[in-house]
Amino acid sequence: MAHSPHDALTLRRNARDALHQHRFDDVDRLLGEMEQQWLDGSTTRFGYGWLLATLLDPAQDLPTRLEQARQWCAHQPHSPHPWAVLGALWDRACGRIRSSETIETIRQVQWDAAGLARDHAMAAWLHTIARHPRPAFVLGRMLRTSCYLGEPRWLQQLQRGGRADLYNAQQHQDPDGFAAAVALLAPYGRPLEALPALPPLLAGRGEEAFEYAADYWQQQALAIRANDTDALETYLYYLYPRWGGSHAVMQDFIDGPEASRLMLPQRNRLRVIKERDWLYFHPDAEHAEDVAQHDQAYAALLDLHLDASTRAQVLCWWAMLDYHLGRDEPQENEVHWDPARMAHARDCLAEALALDPACVVDEGLTVLEACALFAHVEGADRLFAQALASVEDWTDSAHALAWLAAGRQSGLFGFSVDAALATQHLRGALAMAREDEVDLSTVAANLFCAVSAPAGLQMLLELGAAGDPRSMATLVDLYRGRVGGQDFPAFIDPAQESAWTERAIAAGDLVVIYNRAWQLGVAFEQTADPALQQQSRALYRRCVDEAAPHDRVWRPAHKNLAVLLYQGEEDADKQEAVFDLLGPLWWRGDSATRAWAAGFLADVFHFGNGVPANAFLAKTWLERAAEAEPDNDDVLRMRPLIDGQGKLFGASRAARQQARDREAVDLRSWQLTFGQHAVPDRHDVQPV
């Protein structure tokens, strides 16, 4: 049963066919047999967990798969497997909602909405537990989810024997925040409306177990599957310092009783996971000592007795370090490659490919692509083709499928031409790209620039016609005559540029929207046509409303719109600039952005244009700007004004005015300055 990718693919195809034909007993049998292998100790890559995650075709979007899983549960309510799949899909929705941003930049509404999705996942898994004699797999997933997003309050209430309250308290305490979270959840479904009964397995939880939730869920999983490496790896991951643990605590866990029953390769895998915490952060090439430390650490890990999949992972990670250190871009679009580093990356990926092709596709394809197409490392092109060929029948990688589509469409990389298969691959890539966070336009641009311009253009046109906004934006660039830092004057076509610009704006590509807003702003400066300014403001507003903080247009769109609004005549526009645009720039920007925003706000509160003048706030924002960038031009310009320099008794008068104005700060300005939930230590606040 499923000891190889081919066997697993056949089994998955059979299970999909049975599910499509409503032969639910057959689906149960296939899933049950694979799960039993896992319960008996099998840890193959293409096992029960893989089948649960991919049984509903990932080429369909996540909301569609969620609806299919719900229908499956309705048809087969007494089987544990559809509930396990439903929980796994809701778990994926948690990740999509929370996004891949760093923890420090994730908005509260994302956490809240991910919590609503978590509730669905946990409820589905409770259904699984109630229907399964040995639910170790979902208990391990509940461990991960509880560490990642916290335990649901309602579950703790049930386990304490009380009456569970889903969302009444949350809605009462923060109705606007709850509504915003519900809106973010909406593409996937509504908040959980009813709770399942608490399975007997989870009843009678001691009070101490609520304090140490991760320990509780780990013990539940290990009680059923004593050598559950998946649960142990999950527990170890959440001992990373970023989650409140430490490397010393991680080592104690690896050396402790929970891991003592593992075979040597499994314990060594835990050691690899521990070291990955710091190895993930690549050193700069000029820091020779740090670089040597990373190289030595990877070599030491490869000296351990590792299973094939783990060794392949380490090799792919080392190749990624080579890529980071081997690529130098002294100025934009001028890239130099270190031949020795990139050759080492090729060697790592060659060994990894022989051990586990799927690992190379999942974790090393970008590096292999660079070795083959840009650094031109000898033999890398053959490896690239081998990697694609080895996974064509079963890969669920949007990145790989895009390259396979190019190979089948144009006969590249040694593939025979198969237009129908090329279309199938590209459709699959499109369907999975957003969930995989893969930019297919980059694949198409690399194909255009480094492999075949006709093939690259064809892929861009197909992606654009299919509605991919970034590919539309790349076509805009191409018809301006430049893609990927290279000039292509033969492709300049103003009519096509204009047509794809309008399509990209309609499709919501934020870079094209931002560029169009900037162009309209330049045109307004030349003609003073108010209609151009209004169009520019409307497009900047789209960028502000739709861009995530990590998007490249988020910062400049906020800055430009703030300037446009503040230069207007309406106080409402000025207040929008101050509170809705400058505030986020300060609270979420880099040091240069924070200095700019703070300097702007110091100016605003000093002169009181659009908001009440306030010497205390002006001084506060001036000091913040100086802390972010001491030599900032706004700091140097505003300090004499705010500090009263150059006037008789100016400094003492300014200090007294600042003390008086501290008592007159309105609530909105106070919260802008000190945080959304900050409340001043007095009660005589006045509205703006």
Image (cartoon, rainbow, N blue to C red):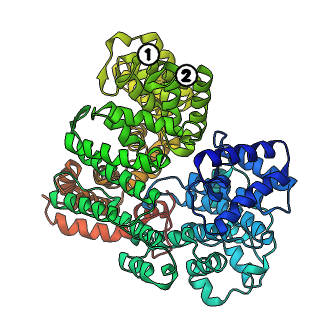
| Kind of residue at disc 1 | Pro
User: Can residue 406 be seen from the camera position used here?
Assistant: yes
Q: Which residue is drawn at 54% across and 20% down?
A: 417
Q: Quadrant of residue 418?
A: top right
Residue named by callout 2:
462
Residue named by callout 1:
454
- Which residue is more in the foreground, 501 or 94? 94
Q: Counting other residues with Cα less than 10 Å from the Cα at mark 1, is it few (<14), some (14-19), or many (20 or more)? A: few
Q: What element carries label 2?
A: helix
| Kind of residue at disc 2 | Glu
- Which residue is more in the foreground, 513 or 156? 156
Alpha carbon distance from label 2 to label 1:
12 Å
Q: Where is residue 94 in the image (x, y as percent from the top left)?
A: 60, 57
Q: Quadrant of residue 367?
A: top left
Q: Please state, as top left, top right, bottom left or bottom right, where the N terminus lies in the image.
A: bottom right
Q: Where is residue 148 in the image (x, y as percent from the top left)?
A: 55, 67
Q: Residue at x 58, y 53 (%)?
A: 97
Q: Residue at x 35, y 23 (%)?
A: 449
Q: Earlier in the sequence, mark 2 or mark 1?
A: 1
Establish if 610 lies above or below 225.
above
